[in-house]
Amino acid sequence: MINRVNISICVVTAAIVTLVGCSSFDGQQVRQEHVKSYRQSLEQRAEELLPGKPLELEHCLKIALKNNLDVRVAEVQRRVAQLSRKASFSQFLPRVNFIYNYTRWDPQPEIVMGLNSQPMHDERIREMTWDIQMSIFNPSTWFMYGMHERGEEIAELVADYTRQMIVVQVTTYYYYCLGLEEIEKVLDSRIRAAEKLTEQLQHYQSEGLVFAWQSEQARTNLQSQKLQRKRVRQLLEQTKGQLLIAMGLSPVDSLQLAVAEPMTVPQGNLDDFITEALLNHPRLRISDREIAIEKEKVKLALSGFLPSLTGFADRVNTTDAFQRYSNYWVMGLSGVLTVFNGFANIYEYDAAKENVKKAALEREQATLTLMLEVFRAYQHLQLVRDAVAIAEDNYKTASEHYDQVYQQWQEGLVNVSDLTSVLAEKDLAEMMRINSQFQVQVAIATLTNAMGKTKIDYEELTNDEK
């Protein structure tokens, strides 16, 4: 009776604890705590990693490779694949389980013998069993382990490829920001010139040398330049926010950038670049291992036709007084052979072979796509390098043209509208020159990434850099 009461108390207590645990979640509080803690962690991370001085590209890349969320997720997936491979290896090792059983009969079972009866076993029995099992012949475990090995290799390649893509992303945003900063400087210079021109025209208007509409035209042009600069400033802040997110930081943090050394143009011709990509690109190396996994699946399906053999041994300790031996061993072998399962194993084997063909075709498609990416990146690099020379000549010509028209305007030979138009041409030529220079760096990074040679082995941040 006492035991039943104790059991009832335990059941009720467990139910109460379970109900309290299910009803203790406060979504609003969890959200508030996460917002508070996450903001604090972002602020602390910014204090540690942003030194308050302009950062070069390499410094930005080091921060991104350490803190980018995609990189960290890929690293977690790599560790999960490694643990899955280790867990698969456990199938080759013996399995040992400890089993404890407590049994109570009420009433105690008895066996009838003539006019009398006698108990079959004790009313209460406790049994402790050490269960040992060992797979002796099971080919599927070998093939499963091979699949997990390839899976671990794929996870490592995916992690490296993620780092490469983050490097390209950070590089693109970095040079885009530098280009916008230079354009902002050009617009500032243009605004100062427009302000000076507006003041001169207002002075000339007061002396009756120009019409009122000419002075108003200059003032309108000044307001237009200020609005354009505001748009560039907003675009720059948004791009810096994207760069900060790629670095694993808050998009509203303050970030200053310094011009880095220009990247080296890859040496070689198009055929060399394509060959390099086909040998080294992570996507194709991943495809190789996906085909290997599909081949292991063919072997796994083939193992369905083979028997499996398992050895077992149990060491039993019992308190049953009716047993002659309280301790004894149970040993034996267990084998399974599928005789007929509705031809499912045959169809699975055929499907596995077709999946090998599918993986091979997908690798071929990836190869052709990669060749096209290298071809496009190579052509784009050639194009932007030619554009740099053209932009330099165009800027030189536009500057000389502006100097000439400005001199003519001071002599009264041209009107304000013509001078403003020529100034706009000069500013546009300067912005195109700056933009073309940074586009070359982005094109180099894109071609290097298409070849699978993006550098990712940057050293950790030093204390001085932090």
Image: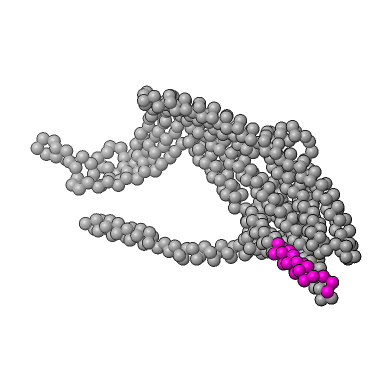
Q: From the image, which quarter does the C terminus lie in?
A: bottom right
State the residue in front, 127 or 37.
37
Residue drawn at x 85%, y 49% is 393
Give the extent of the magenta segment: 208-229
Residue drawn at x 34%, y 60% is 19
Query: In the picture, residue 218 is in which quadrant?
Result: bottom right
Instruction: Tell me which secondary structure the magenta stretch mostly adopts.
Output: helix
Residue 428 placement, left or right of 72:
right
State the residue in front, 201 or 168.
201
Residue drawn at x 37%, y 23% is 339
Question: Where residue 237 sits in the image (x, y, percent)?
Answer: 67, 61
Question: Where residue 169 sits in the image (x, y, percent)?
Answer: 66, 49
Q: Is residue 226 above or below residue 280?
A: below
Residue 19 placement, left or right of 40:
left
State the residue in front, 336 or 265.
265
Question: Where residue 178 sits in the image (x, y, percent)?
Answer: 74, 56
